[in-house]
Each structure stands twice: as C-alpha cells, then as structure tokens.
Image: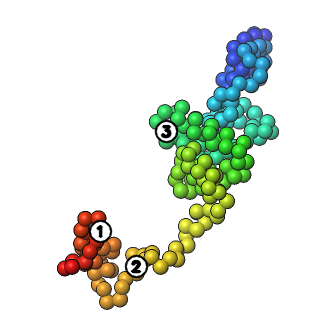
Amino acid sequence: MSEAVIVGGGLAGGAAAIQLARASHGVHLLERECEPVDKICGEFLSIEAQRALDRLGIDLDRLGASRIGTLLCEKILVERSHPEQGFRACLGIVRLVKSFGRERVEAACSRALDIEARTFGSVKSILDNGLDRLPSVRSAAGQPIDHPNIRGPDITTEGDESAATSYPRTADQHGLRRHGAGVRRIGE
C-alpha cells in the first residue's frame, strides 16, 4: 500500500485526501492552521465547488452549510469579468445573514433576480428598505397596473385617429413645442 502526504487541507487538499483514501492509499493531510481561517472560500462555495463536494459524498446541508442566494450568486459569477469581483459580491451577500437572517436574505436574493439587480449593493438596499417583505414582483407581473396616468398601446382617445397610429406620440404631435426648460403650446 502506498502512502501520500498532502500539504494543505483546503478544498483541493481535502478532496485529494478523500479520493486517495477511497482508493485504499494511506493519506497524511497537513494543515498549517489548527483553527478555521476567515477567507472567501471558507465562507462562500461556488456552485462548481458545491457540485464537486457533492460528487465526493460530502453533505453540505448535514454539515450546517447555508445555501444563500444560490441562483443569484451563480449569475453574479458568470456575469463578472473578473472572478474575484463575483466572489466578493457573493461573500458579502452570505455575510448579510448575520445581520438580517437567512429567510430575509433569501427573499432579497429572489427579489434581486426578479428585478435583474444582481449586485451586493442591490441586495443590501432591498434588505435595508424592507422590500424583501413585500409580495414578489413576479406575482404581480401578470396583472395590469391600475393608475389614471398609465394607458396601454391599445387605448385611444375617441375620434383621435393619430393616437392609434402613432402611439406614443411626440410633443410636436400633441401640439406642443419644447422651449428652453419648459413646454408650451404651438402658437402661444
């Protein structure tokens, strides 16, 4: 039986030790620190890392890991040009759990996805303003907005043929002309 020495008990070292031990090799895993160290990969696991740990048979839920904003973080990581920016944003989102609680952060991540605001600042703003406690934007999306100042493209003024053919109309079509910072009727 061969033996291996692995230096570093992080994700890669731990994964290598597991694989070698399962293949009946003796493994010595050396780690410099006795206590956990605060670093990005210690608090945030990317989707790829979660899948790799799952393939190794490590149950993150049983170990007490919290899946926070998984879909949001996946989109953040894909959209950023530099991975470090995405990791920092996701780490910030995960750390919000300490201040706001898991349920509120999950609701804020869901709302951020709904409104396509995929940043740490957006999630924090949603939480700070209590928008995570409001009904989902998605649930209201199919219902028309009832407000006197809003009209749809299918609504026309009776007898006004130009409204139906040129919606939305420009200021000139309404008989208005821009003048400096204000608007006035043509001919005034």
Q: Residues within 10 Å of mark 1 (few under 14, many from 20)?
A: few
Distance between mark 1 and mark 2 Cα atoms:
29 Å
Distance between mark 1 and mark 3 Cα atoms:
42 Å
- Decide which of 28, 22 is in the foreground and name it: 28
Q: Of the residues shown, which amino acid type is indicated by label 3?
A: Arg
Residue 154 is tagged as 2
Q: Is residue 120 above or below residue 20?
A: below
User: Image quadrant for the C terminus?
Assistant: bottom left
Q: Nearer the viewer, mark 1 or mark 3?
A: 1
Q: Residue at x 77, y 22 (%)?
A: 35
Q: Residue at x 25, y 65 (%)?
A: 180
Which colouring convention does the figure follow?
A: rainbow
Find numbered disc 3 in the image and state the secondary structure of the residue it sits on.
loop
**Badge 3 is on which residue?**
80
Residue 66, horizontal then vertical, whole percent: 73, 42
Q: Of the residues shown, which amino acid type is indicated by label 2?
A: Asp
Q: Is residue 138 above or below residue 64?
A: below
Q: Nearer the viewer, mark 1 or mark 2?
A: 1
Q: Is residue 23 visible?
A: no
- The earlier-in-sequence mark between 1 and 2 is 2
- Decide which of 162, 8 is in the foreground and name it: 162
Residue 79, horizontal then vertical, whole percent: 49, 42
- The earlier-in-sequence mark between 3 and 2 is 3
Q: Is residue 111 above or below residue 23?
A: below
Q: Residues within 10 Å of mark 3 (few under 14, many from 20)?
A: few
- The earlier-in-sequence mark between 1 and 3 is 3
**Badge 1 is on which residue?**
182
Q: Is residue 134 visible?
A: yes
Q: Of the residues shown, which amino acid type is indicated by label 1?
A: Gly
